[in-house]
Image (spheres, rainbow, N blue to C red):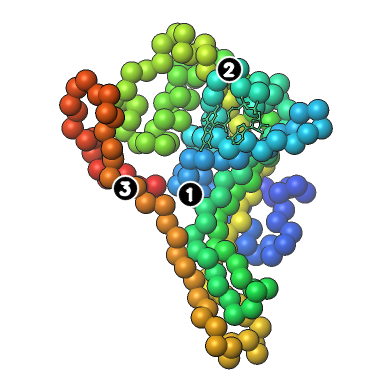
Amino acid sequence: MTHFQPTERTQVKRLPKRGRYDEETVFQILDSAFVCHVGFCVDGQPFVIPTNYGRSGNTLYLHGSAASRMLKTLSAEVPVCVTVTHVDRLVLARSAFHHSVNYRSVVILGTARLVQDSHEKMEALRIFTEHVVKGRWEQIRWPNEQEMKATTVLALPLEEVSAKVRTGGPVDDEPDYALPVWAGVLPLETMPKTPEPDAARKADVPLPDYLKNYTR
Ligand SMILES: Cc1cc2nc3c(=O)[nH]c(=O)nc-3n(C[C@H](O)[C@H](O)[C@H](O)COP(=O)(O)OP(=O)(O)OC[C@H]3O[C@@H](n4cnc5c(N)ncnc54)[C@H](O)[C@@H]3O)c2cc1C
């Protein structure tokens, strides 16, 4: 199994047994989400901006308007921190102190590269789209020259990466197990609901299979 090498900055310090560095865990967490939070500093002021992403191999792709401050800032190869989080369960203990959350999260540190080559840029946009809705790219109109110009694509290498995962139920202090308090876990899940066709449609198109069977 391939592992990311923990560094001084990515070594999980609190409850280090929850730290994971294997590619399988990191990629599974990244591939089952499509929203990340991107942290960067401008003039000493930190910003953390939610945005979408796609992954291919050891690269995370971000995209957006060429006018976006986030993309302009990151294009200058400033240090960036990207996080992705899943909340799987609420963990309800008998004491306030031992309440917790079962989560899977990834933190990526590095600097992003502006994707300038037009073929790589188009491929990155394909990866980005397919990451969110697999099967979509082949059916949609691809970006034209003007739209490509208006779009910035960044590639962030997955090199300095950590994952942290909590599983299991509550862990209470021994005397608290006798307390008359319900304890356990509440599983949580993001589920697709019934697709709603656009009211402005001019053609009736059957619902694609990739939406009928959408899962993360
Ligand atoms: C789920 C999700 C997915 C997104 N996907 C993309 C994407 O793929 N590409 C993309 O370019 N943008 C995406 N956005 C929008 C993104 O969060 C920014 O709003 C957008 O990039 C504009 O950035 P900017 O640099 O122009 O804003 P800035 O100039 O950085 O914003 C100025 C200020 O506006 C406020 N602000 C900006 N964005 C937000 C926000 N989302 N919520 C609350 N306050 C905000 C903050 O106070 C910020 O300091 C997404 C947002 C969400 C929630």
Q: Residue at x 46, y 13 (%)?
A: 147
Q: Which residue is mark 1?
A: 28
Q: Residue at x 31, y 47 (%)?
A: 193
- Nearest to N terminus: mark 1 or mark 2: 1
Report the front residue among 186 and 80: 186
Q: Residues within 10 Å of mark 1 (few under 14, many from 20)?
A: few
- Nearest to N terminus: mark 1 or mark 3: 1
Q: Secondary structure at mark 1?
A: helix
Q: Residue at x 45, y 65 (%)?
A: 187
Task: Give residue 193's mark.
Answer: 3
CA distance for labels 1 and 2? 30 Å
Report the front residue among 78 and 17: 78
Query: Residue 76 in the image: x percent, y percent?
Result: 71, 21
Left or right: where 90 falls relative to 18: left
Q: Is residue 94 visible?
A: yes
CA distance for labels 1 and 3? 23 Å
Q: Residues within 10 Å of mark 3 (few under 14, many from 20)?
A: few
Task: Give residue 66's mark.
Answer: 2
Query: Residue 48 in the image: x percent, y percent?
Result: 66, 38
The residue at the far front in this view is 199
